[in-house]
Amino acid sequence: MHLWQNAAWEPAFVFLANLLVYSVIINIVLACFNLIPIPPLDGGRIITALLPHRLQRQFARIEPFGILILVALLFTKSLDLLFSFFITPLISLLLGFNPFSG
């Protein structure tokens, strides 16, 4: 009998498995959120680096309003597309199952 098959250790292993699953989910959500192409985030920096110089300056002018744009996107649930299109399939791919399917 292996250690993980012992009934006394089962709650600890379930807790650790859940902890690992949630840490993967949190890291995927944070990584995808950080890649949103709004200037204070890294996605905005990537877009700025790819734009021609004239457009870089125009795009960089919205940086002071970036946090307000993010708050507006969060309150209007406009980021739900990000979750449904990118994050949920990525989580399913990395974990091998969909933790949101009930």
Image: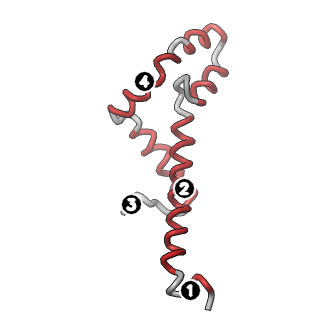
Residue 9 position in % (x across, y down): 54, 81
> Which disc number belongs to residue 23?
2
First of labels 2, 3 by sequence position = 2
Residue 47 position in % (x across, y down): 60, 24
First of labels 4, 1 by sequence position = 1
The three-letter amino acid code for the residue at tag 3 is Ser
102 to 61, vertically: above or below: below
What residue sits 57% from the left and 14% below the top? 60
The kind of secondary structure element at disc 1 is helix
Which residue corresponds to mark 3?
101
Mark-to-mark CA distance, 2 and 3: 18 Å
Mark-to-mark CA distance, 2 and 4: 27 Å
Q: Could you tell me if the residues under marks 2 and 3 are in contact, i.e. CB atoms within 8 Å?
A: no
Mark-to-mark CA distance, 2 and 1: 24 Å
Mark-to-mark CA distance, 3 and 4: 30 Å
The three-letter amino acid code for the residue at tag 2 is Ser
Residue 84 position in % (x across, y down): 42, 45
Mark-to-mark CA distance, 1 and 3: 27 Å
Of tags 1 and 3, the one toward the viewer is 1
What residue sits 52% from the left and 25% below the top? 38
Which residue corresponds to mark 1?
5
The three-letter amino acid code for the residue at tag 4 is Ile
64 to 30, vertically: above or below: above
